[in-house]
Amino acid sequence: MTMHHLQIGNGQTIPAAIFDDPREFGQFTAERIRDLIAGATRDVAICFATGATPLPVYERLVEMHAAGGVSFERVNAFLLDEYIGLPEGHEQSFATFMRRHLFDHVGLPAARFHAPNGRGYNPVEESRRYRETIDAVGGLDLTLLGIGPNGHIAFNEPGSRADEHVRLVALAPKTREANARFFGDLDQVPKHAITIGIADILASRRLILMATGAGKAEILERALRGPITPDVPASFLQTHPGELTLVADRAAAARLIA
Ligand code: F6R
């Protein structure tokens, strides 16, 4: 692992941890989460990303918990987003994904798992409820983010604004194509989702942006060094006033780090 002070587009620098080995990538990020929980004097609110990128992180957290190294008893866990319309317990629902990969294995109390309900009749009302749930715990202490090939963060697709909160969104064709690998067939991928907004992400006290693989190199450079624009929603991260850390493998960071 190498630690860098990465110059980003607004003239600021952010810490960037760059890895050769996915296991180390997972270990580093899991340790940040463990340390945040261990150091907190009150409940901790963490918003978790689904997708392929964070899987090594969740594997390490499960191992750490089994070894007695981390407790989720005082964590309020949130999801970035959820598809609309998948039946309860559907393999690809993000709630199911997070239970299967993390929450079922780390003793997270059921009442502390918060997710948008993608099966309700009124997604606008559900979005309001979810935002209030985040507010009720005092906002997010840490948000884990992946980045979509089109620069989306959570499901804030190109065109999203920095002042938008939790809401119903239509998924971009590129996002549905990228996620078809999980559904086996493009037709099965939902067309809508509820996502936390860029404003909610920017209000999170800490952010960890995770990216792996050469396929993310170009968009990661545009996000962190390119113009701040709704065309690349992740570019709004450059304006985050708190602690933003990049955790990436060498392939994803290739255009940022010599
Ligand atoms: C997941 C999410 C998405 C993913 C992004 C990258 O909850 O909101 O923004 O983080 O699509 O996905 P992967 O990691 O599968 O490349």
Image (cartoon, helix red, strand yellow):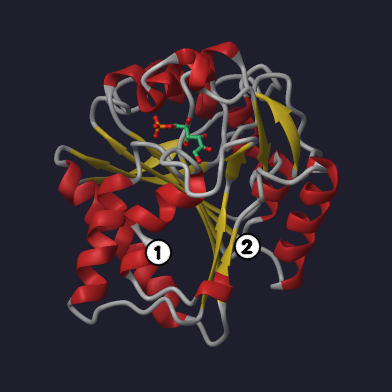
Q: Earlier in the sequence, mark 1 or mark 2?
A: 1
> Residue at left 31%, top 77%?
70
Which is closer to the viewer, label 1 or label 2? 1
Considering the image in quadrants, where does the C terminus appear? top left
Above or below for 176 versus 138: above
The mark found on residue 64 in the picture is none
> Residue at left 84%, top 42%?
124
Judge left or right: residue 1 versus residue 96: left
Above or below for 191 versus 84: above
Most foreground residue, 225 or 126: 126
Percent position (x, y) of residue 26?
25, 51
Most foreground residue, 24 or 63: 63
Above or below for 197 versus 59: above
Q: Which quarter of the figure has residue 87?
A: top right
| SS label for mark 1 | helix
Judge left or right: residue 8 versus residue 114: left
Circle 1 residues within 10 Å: few <14, some 14–19, many ≥20: many
Marks 1 & 2, CB-CB < 8 Å contact? no
Give amino acid for label 2. Leu
The mark found on residue 103 in the picture is 1
Circle 2 residues within 10 Å: few <14, some 14–19, many ≥20: many
Percent position (x, y) of residue 41?
53, 87
> Residue at left 63%, top 27%?
233
Percent position (x, y) of residue 158?
66, 19
Judge left or right: residue 210 versus residue 242: left
Most foreground residue, 225 or 65: 65
Give amino acid for label 1. Phe
Judge left or right: residue 238 versus residue 4: right
Q: Which quarter of the figure has residue 106?
A: bottom left
The mark found on residue 140 in the picture is 2
> Residue at left 31%, top 26%?
252
Tell me the CA gap for discs 1 and 2.
18 Å
